[in-house]
Image: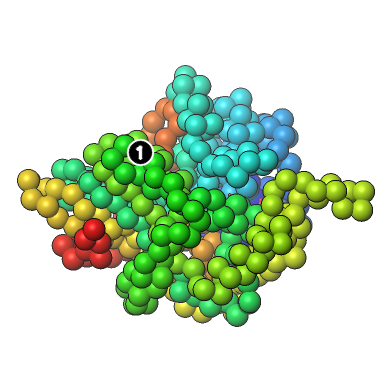
Amino acid sequence: MAKVLIIGAGGVGNVVTHKCAQIQSVFSEILLASRTKEKCDAIAASVDHPNLSTAQVNADQSSEVSALIKDFQPDIVINVALPYQDLPIMDACLEMGVNYLDTANYEPPDEAKFEYKWQWAYHERYKQAGLTAILGCGFDPGVTGVFTAYALKHYFDEIHYLDIVDCNAGNHGQAFATNFNPEINIREITQNGRYYKHGDWVEVEPFAIHRPIHYPEIGPRESYLLYHEELESLVKNVPTIKRARFWMTFSESYINHLKVLENVGLTRIEPIEYEGQQIVPLQFLKAVLPQPSSLGQTYEGQTSIGCHIRGIKDGQERSYYVYNNCDHAEAFKEVGAQAIAYTTGVPAMIGALLVATGEWQGAGVFNVEQMNPDPFMEKLGTYGLPWHEVFDASEFTD
Ligand code: NDP
């Protein structure tokens, strides 16, 4: 029996709350807290759990999070607010002696740069305190790290090439919208692309490298090389990797919209003065775009995310592909969310469940691939994200 504090009441927070509430034998009490309490209350009204309460918190202030923890005494905090709140929430967990889990690594608000160094710097302090912090436990990062760890444990002696492929073949009927927080999403995809090759990072212009990739049940889709945060931890934790890349699909229309928004300055993160007020253009853009959580109602089609892995086993070269397809409309029917929020929220709940039940243990700060992948893989299918394997038929030969 565990008490869980969920921070963040957006699309992902909604899914995490629904999924935790489905497992009352483990998550006996839930507190959902966020900046806007009304959003927590709206989620709570759609969830069936006898011990679910809500609270207001500004998680930029670790003292506010500490006060909430002191009051509620959770066993674990699931942070599904924004990456900017990672450090204050980690500080509060450390101060109050509570385990921590998130789905996105810290980035400073004034610089579009995500890196694990800020959170890895907490390792010794969490270790000394005997606490567990699990970083990046959504789908990507998250399941993609577990997929890689599972492949290494069961099918490879050494992994040499890793290509993570992420396709959203869904249609929400909007001209332009992002599938999770627009500010975080646009900061991520307008950065330079970057991939790992023989110990170095190769940097390229945004959207410069692309190719059609075949996705199961979907077909070929143009996919663009992006820098994604799990690449940083995976090449550290799986040091035999010679090359690691991340690919994501975008439609031509999406890229055209983005280019126009960039060209007119609306994706900028430096504040500008407007009628006597400081505003950040990207935050203004976020305010006028559709809320990602509102897209679910009309969303059709599937996401398909997986890992193409090549390496050696018993001296022989082999390839392996492991993936999940998730249907937007099915996710909406179950928890009132589109598939991007669903595929992020389910793994966050599973990670928290494994920490709460002691199946994932360790004192310190860990990325998911450092944990035993087996119980996680077993639970993925049970809780809504079935996965499939393809052996020795790689999409990638180069
Ligand atoms: P949303 O913008 O929908 O929700 C974010 C929530 O956090 C909102 O409820 C917001 O409150 C709340 N929040 C923001 N600032 C604060 C604060 N200072 N104190 C307390 N609460 C705050 O985002 P998503 O649900 O789409 O994404 C949530 C997280 O999941 C993000 O970090 C995102 O990067 C990550 N993610 C990870 C993925 C993965 O696969 N690993 C994929 C997709 C997302 P308010 O409503 O008042 O603004």
Q: Quadrant of residue 39?
A: bottom right
Query: Which quarter of the figure is the C terminus placed in?
Result: bottom left
Tag 1: amino acid: Asp
Compared across the picture, whether 103 is left or right of 54 comes to left
Q: Quadrant of residue 291?
A: bottom right
Which residue is label 1 attached to? 200
Q: Which colour scheme is used?
A: rainbow
> Which residue is more in the foreground, 242 or 368?
242
Return the x and y of residue 222 as percentages of the image width and height.
Answer: 41, 70
Compared across the picture, whether 68 is left or right of 120 comes to right
Q: Quadrant of residue 95?
A: top right
Query: Looking at the image, which residue is at 54% across and 61% down?
Result: 341
| Residue 182 in view in this figure | yes
Q: Mark 1: few, some, or many residues within 10 Å (few <14, many ≥20)? A: few
Q: Is mark 1 on a helix, strand or loop?
A: strand
> Which residue is more in the foreground, 196 or 380?
196
Return the x and y of residue 147 as percentages of the image width and height.
Answer: 31, 52
Return the x and y of residue 369 as percentages of the image width and height.
Answer: 35, 42
Query: Looking at the image, which residue is at 65% across and 60% down?
Result: 262
Return the x and y of residue 314 as percentages of the image width and height.
Answer: 7, 46
Count how many numbered circles sit on residues in the image. 1
| Residue 43 in view in this figure | no
Query: Looking at the image, which residue is at 60% across and 45% down?
Result: 112
The extreme top residue here reads: 128
Query: Looking at the image, which residue is at 76% across and 57% down?
Result: 284
In the displayed structure, would residue 385 be above or below residue 226?
below
In the displayed structure, would residue 103 be above or below residue 237?
below
Q: Is mark 1 within 8 Å of ligand 1?
A: no
The extreme right residue here reads: 276
> Which residue is more in the foreground, 193 or 92?
193
